[in-house]
Amino acid sequence: MSLWIMNASVWNEERSELERKHVRIEEGVIASIVNGSESVDAGGSETIDADGKLLSPGFIDMHVHLRDPGFEYKEDIESGSRSAAKGGFTTIACMPNTRPVTDTAETVRYIVDKARDQAIVKVLPYAAITKSELGRELTDFASLKEAGAIGFTDDGVGVQNAQMMKDAMALAQSLDMPVIAHCEDDSLVKGAWATEGEFSRKHGMKGIPNESEAIHVGRDVLLAEATGVHYHVCHVSTEQSVRLIRLAKQVGIRVTAEVCPHHLLLSDEDIPGLNDANWKMNPPLRSPRDVQAVIEALEDGTLDMIVTDHAPHSAEEKARGVDLAPFGIVGFETAFPLLYTKFVETGRWTLGFLLQRMTSDPARVFRLNSGRLEVGAPADLTIVDLTSERAVDPTSFLSKGTNTPFGGWSLKGWPIATIVDGKLVWSE
């Protein structure tokens, strides 16, 4: 099947500007890219007139929660993939803290098979490091890899035992697989939901200190150095973690890391009070100083990519109040507009920088055959309206979750069409 995308604006990194292009897709692959000034004969091909809107490689999100199996009332593979497509994502990697935990080949195959049948974007499953994510016994890494897992993580909880983590890294390294770590020392976080900072002090609450995250980062980079594994740090949120990752990279340790839009845009001082659990997430919103640290770390390459940590919950769960509600917010449908409006429109970042951190960089880190807009690449593409402005409306989300602190924010940069393997899977 042939498809032409006409009159698209494509980012030219060398010139740091948008250029008008026509893009031809054949059999799910980008077949040619033609200057927009040239006339083309589309013949009997299907055509999409981009009308000058941005055409980007499809966004890649390497940290998402699809809640399937076990928590399908929060999200499932079908609804999560539709939400991802609406946000411009063409590849997503789902975390294993499901029920049952994704700790057996059977559960990995369940996700792979269900994604093939029901997902409209590419779904890559992670598998757990330890059985039931209890930190007591390693899973069967070899069978999990064979079933389709792309890496190992106990996301949602930190691996508390250093020997267990070292053994996991050594085993993963022997299989040429990455270890992806949720960094959190449990002994420092019990009984708290907000960071140890201005907000917690104001309300007389116990806070989650920065070192709860950074202690595990420091431990794990040393273990990664000892084992040689590719070690990837989840949702970095603190200045101390940034410092340790930067140093580890400088001395040649094989470490990569990610950051979420909410940790780039919000601090604990933005939390409006104790009544809205849509501001409760893990890691928690940190101090303004930490926000600046992670922004600068993303800019200098210490942090390699942007992820959403899309974490849907039911409205009933989030209505229980901040002490009882689960951690997490949704992220697919607001990620690009938030970052485009707050960093590109304000002139801090180029459009190319934002696109790189959401496409080619995650593809490079995880060795994916995607994230490129060039001849021969898979036709995983996103069309974005950079000029129209509208407010975030959680009631319009395709996700089952509406738990977001960004409701009502007026943003530009909304995806309007998503193409996976040359097929239009979502369009406004």
Image: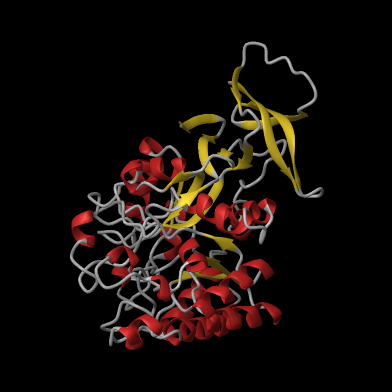
Coloring basis for residues: secondary structure
> Toward the viewer: 32 or 16?
16
Q: Nearer the viewer, residue 80 or 155?
A: 80
Task: Note whether 29 is above or below 16 in the view shown.
Answer: above
As displayed, is residue 129 above or below residue 393?
A: below
Residue at image x 29%, y 59%?
A: 98
Residue at screen point 34% across, 63% down: 328
From what the image shows, is residue 171 above or below residue 69?
below
Task: Give the image quarter of residue 64.
Answer: bottom left
Q: State whether residue 251 is above or below residue 172.
A: below
Residue displayed at 57% across by 38% down: 385
Q: Which of 66 and 194 lies nearest the eye of the viewer?
A: 194
> Residue 204: where, in percent of width, then height?
28, 87
For the view shown, which residue lies furthest in the top direction? 44
Q: Where is residue 386 in the image (x, y as percent from the top left)?
A: 59, 42
Question: Residue at horizontal 74%, vertical 18%?
Answer: 40
Which quarter of the figure has residue 366?
Answer: bottom right
What is the tally of numbered marks visible in this picture? 0
Q: In which quarter of the image is the N terminus?
A: top right
- Judged left or right of residue 230, residue 133 is left
Percent position of residue 60, x then y: 54, 50
From the viewer's side, name the closer residue of 303 and 204. Answer: 204
Residue 265 in the image: x percent, y percent?
50, 65
